Amino acid sequence: MISTVFALYVLLTLDAMFSGICAASGRDARIDKRAYFVNAMIHGIGWGQVACLLGLLILTVAVYASSDPGLAVEQMVGVGGRMIRVYVVYAVTILSFFVVRAIPSVDIRSMTSTVAFGPLTLVRPAVIVLGIGWGLAGGAQPSVVVAGLLIAMLMVPFRTLLNRWFDLAERSPL
Amino acid sequence: MVGVGEIPAGSRPELLEISDLIVDFDIETMSRRPVNRDEVVERLSMVGDRPAARIVAGMPANDGVLDPDAVDRLLIRVHCEMQRLSEEFQHGRRVFEFLASLLAALDQAGVPPPYRIVDIGCGTGYVIRWLSALADFPQEVELIGVDFNEALVREAQRLSAAEQLDCRFEVINAFKMARPATVYLSTGVLHHFRGDGLDDFLLQHDQPDTQAFVHYDFQPTPLARPGAWAFHYIRMREPLSRHDGVVSARRAHDADTLLKSARRTSFACGMYGTRVWKLPIPRVFHTLLGVRPDVIDAFRQTLGRRVGRLGPLA
């Protein structure tokens, strides 16, 4: 159970970190933006922790709401394990394109944006839904299904909400 | 004037960019003219672009005149978003690699430095600032960005000062500078010139000290429209950015049109970098190049392995 929770935590934190970069991009026109993006990643990770806590709260409520809390926990671990398989494929795909992007070629680097990072950003909400759907497809009691749906509703708009946060931060600089 | 309902069936409506309509300048005095919001909305409606008309209708106005400060702030945000795409597509380094070969060729051909590189329609000056911050030209260069929009130029100046960059930005007609450029440069500017305007723009490059021009713009291909839509949808936040980005790709000139106009000048002109390597995959941008005929041989040599990207020069 611990390994499943840890893996999901790492995946969510990675997603939150990249979401921070995405939400901050296109807002600062300096050439050297390293410090700016480190700051954006920290904010992304920070809000990712808030999402983690909310997720944990949802799961806790789902366990207490269940007629069989022990079975609910067991099913949650099973659902989480199946979700990880989907998210690991997505994460590894993204990270492998960062390896490709390290090649010092203008064409290769710009192509990673065209064929990888752009489309992968576009499909992120679908991947989140697919992961949770695939996790729940293994079978789960209603309280676990509801928890899964609530977590999807939290994570799908996470990047949009982070954008709003950066909109506010732009008006009153962090 | 022709109303929307009067556009003949099957004819292609005019494609207009909002950013071209919400600002107006007197070309001679460089002063700003007021823009009537309703007139812009009507013009966009007449060509059937209701989403664009809605965007403009939502812009703040005083007594029907678009609020120039609000327009400036919007355009600065839009240019910041555009810079994001330039960064993703490595545009600064792409320009640097090309200019490095070109300036080396000028050096070999005996053109005396300093080489004055002028970015026309520089906006917030991304390319010039990138070159100033990260390019290491062995030759002595002057990096200058020019634009008609004072607010964008002020922002470029602010950004270059913030990073202590050795470049400058001016509100001036690029072809009326006291000293003309050695190399004129632009990104995403050519498609703003239509018909005779394109000829006039390119003919103005024909100045005695000018050795070359390098203009990057969208390449019109079947992939350009869906690609531009997808990228502007994913990466841009401002509705104006999303709208104009797609329209820019749609109204971009093909290579034949560009070459036909460019070859009226005394430069040897050709296209550069239309395909990815030797694959039948079009690049997002193609490059219109004009170079003095006596520099061609040196340029082919200094391009090195990239010489295969250079189309016929004539």
Image (cartoon, grey):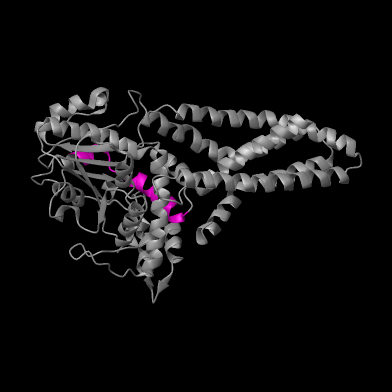
Q: Is residue B254 magenta?
A: yes
The number of numbered badges drawn on the structure is 0
Q: Is residue B40 visible?
A: yes
User: Going 33% across and 25% down the picture, which residue do you hit?
Assistant: B277
Q: Is residue B22 magenta?
A: no
A65 left or right, relative to B51: right
Q: Which residues are magenta?
A: B238-259
Extreme residue toward the right, this view: A67
Q: Quadrant of the C terminus of chain B?
A: top left
B135 left or right, relative to B182: right
Extreme residue toward the front, this view: B164
Residue B272 at what x, y percent from top left?
A: 25, 32
Q: Nearer the viewer, residue A174 or B206?
A: A174
B263 left or right, relative to A36: left
Which quarter of the figure has residue B51? bottom left
User: Going 23% across and 28% down the picture, which residue do you hit?
Assistant: B310
Residue B204 at what x, y percent from top left?
A: 14, 49
Residue B52 at what x, y percent from top left?
A: 42, 58
Helix, strand or loop for the magenta stretch, by majority: helix
